[in-house]
Amino acid sequence: MKKRNDNARLFFAAALGGLAGAAITLLFAPKSGKETRAQLNEKSQQVKRLAQQGAATVAPLIAPQTVARLPQSHHYDYDAIIIGGGHNGLVTAAYLARAGRKVLVLERRPIVGGAAVTEELIPGFKFSSCADGLGGLSPTIVRDLNLQQHGLEYLHADPAIFAPQPDGRALTIWRDVNRTVREIEPFSRRDAARYPDFMALIGKVSKLVGALMAVTPPQMPRPALTDMPELLKLLGPARQLSKKDIHDTLRILPMSVADLLDEWFESDALRGLIAARGITGITWGPRAAGTAYMLLYSCAGDGQAFGSGGIVKGGMGGLTQALAGAARHNGVEIRTEAEVAEIVIENGQTCGVRLANGQIVTAAAIISNADPRTTFMKLVDPQVLDPFFVRQVQNIKYRGSGARVHLALKELPEFTALDNHDPAQYLRGYVRIAPSLDYLEKAFDAAKYGQFARRPYLDVTIPSLADPSLAPAGQHVMSIYMQYAPYHLQEGSWEECREALGEVVINTLAEYTPNLKEMVLDSRVLTPLDLEIIYGLPEGNPSHGEMTLDQFLYMRPVPGYAQYRAPIQGLYLCGAGSHTGGGVTGLPGYNAAREILKDWGRR
């Protein structure tokens, strides 16, 4: 009985503390593999009953949840309108339609996909404009929506990462751990020996972070009893961790990625290569506290500290076109070039939207895939909102610092470190320029003072190696993600600095591939301001708000509104500005659809 009572207290702590509470839960959980599935299910039911029986004693801490139901029948044009046809909006739309709802998606651009699109930015050359790689879409979504039947195809690459070094060598990361160990040995035998254990730890801990991504955060500071089933979903991944793993998890979450890597490795090449994944997309350097969490978050989809090499066939637009196909298959109506100017609110409740052309379209539920600031400061009149809530939204940190440079190449460039190797094999994954922790920290230093880095961290892909349809025969497309380029420049404008930014990126990469400039036929530079204006990424931030510890789980987008419901009846969020955040996972849209269907009385 004592253990049962301990477990009941355990889950109340989880509800109160969010991620920290969930971690505390693990400390008291039985060791992995000691209980059968039937025993675990029985224990879960016991915890639920104890929670219900003890509701009176924990009333000051646990609040009953009251959610306004959405009408089953109504006089509106649609059951739901999705504002924005990005991948999260398409995921939400597809799940709602699959549940029998009449759904409309409104997209202001001529194509759907948001930031995950393929575009012919240079005549004859097709680029993944903002996002690249495999995307990281949740396997659950791929399976549920039968996306392969709608054209989704992954083209995997091995090696996953090719990292040329300033001394002419290269560190190559293969899918085979043992082969990677042999690659690391010339840099450090000690690091090579420790690498498998590090990868095993990252794989286990990132599974817990991945489980957090699939749950709806608890209401804080007074969680509801109905939050308990979501937290129970963490039991499975938790049981796979030993007590040492749990201790490591609690230590790692608030650490800097630099401190974490200093404990494990000594070689600059390996530490820089891993640290880069912990700072991608945020305006922080590797020595900032909390960047280790960002590393775990980015690993949650694949369990790999470097990412899974490869691309979506047809570019990232191939992924979102498959989502659009699945949505239409389930009955979703999609309108492009249909910009929403206003969310219409009557008597404290949404009832539709007004388009830029003046047309009014009505619906019982309005779901915004736009970022929170755009939703509540532009599409909604802030005067109808509580002033404290408005202040919270205004305080959301965006601070984008990434830029994109796209190159049309007449031939493959020649990397110095590949003199005796086949470049067509080694360049199919990412080419990463991040030779050390100091290199990354110095690149960040420029952003602190409103300047773009003159020696930036670069992630480079040449997707035409795996998918020749993206470029004319014998030619190639190269896409480069550059960090750091702050949205707010101390001197000059981004229009004035666009050409200089492109030159810095090409010059940096040319240090490792001297004939690059001779190969370039044309280029296209997307500054943080371009990412905001063209693709709707506020301040150029693809995550609709920085992915930092003070802006995640029950604090995303703001405390008290992490369950996808806005403070206006009938209005919801489904974009990256809500839990779980950025990346092309589709999980914010997936989780939002689940909560909306609950409000309709459906699962």
Image: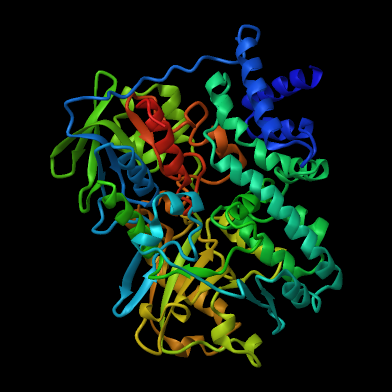
Residue at 73% over, 75% down: 179
On the rendered structure, is 250 left or right of 126?
Answer: right
- Residue nearer the viewer, 446 or 298: 298
Position in image of residue 142 (x %, y %)? 44, 54
On the rendered structure, is 205 left or right of 568?
Answer: right
Residue at 37% over, 25% down: 601
Q: Quadrant of residue 592?
A: top left
Q: Quadrant of residue 52?
A: top right
Residue 287 visible within the image: no
104 vs 385: above or below: below
Q: Quadrant of residue 271?
A: bottom right
Chosen colour scheme: rainbow
Position in image of residue 280 (x %, y %)? 57, 58
- Residue nearer the viewer, 541 or 203: 203
Looking at this view, name the residue that lies furthest to the bottom.
420
Residue at 79% over, 17% down: 1
Position in image of residue 153 (x %, y %)? 43, 67
How many numbered marks, from 0 up? 0
On the rendered structure, is 22 left or right of 115?
Answer: right
- Residue nearer the viewer, 87 or 344: 87
Looking at this view, name the residue that lies furthest to the top.
56
- Residue nearer the viewer, 239 or 157: 239
Residue at 31% over, 24% down: 70
335 vs 407: above or below: above
Q: Quadrant of the C terminus?
A: top left
Looking at this view, name the residue that lies furthest to the right.
190
On the rendered structure, is 258 left or right of 327?
Answer: right
Position in image of residue 239 (x %, y %)? 72, 40
Residue 307 visible within the image: yes
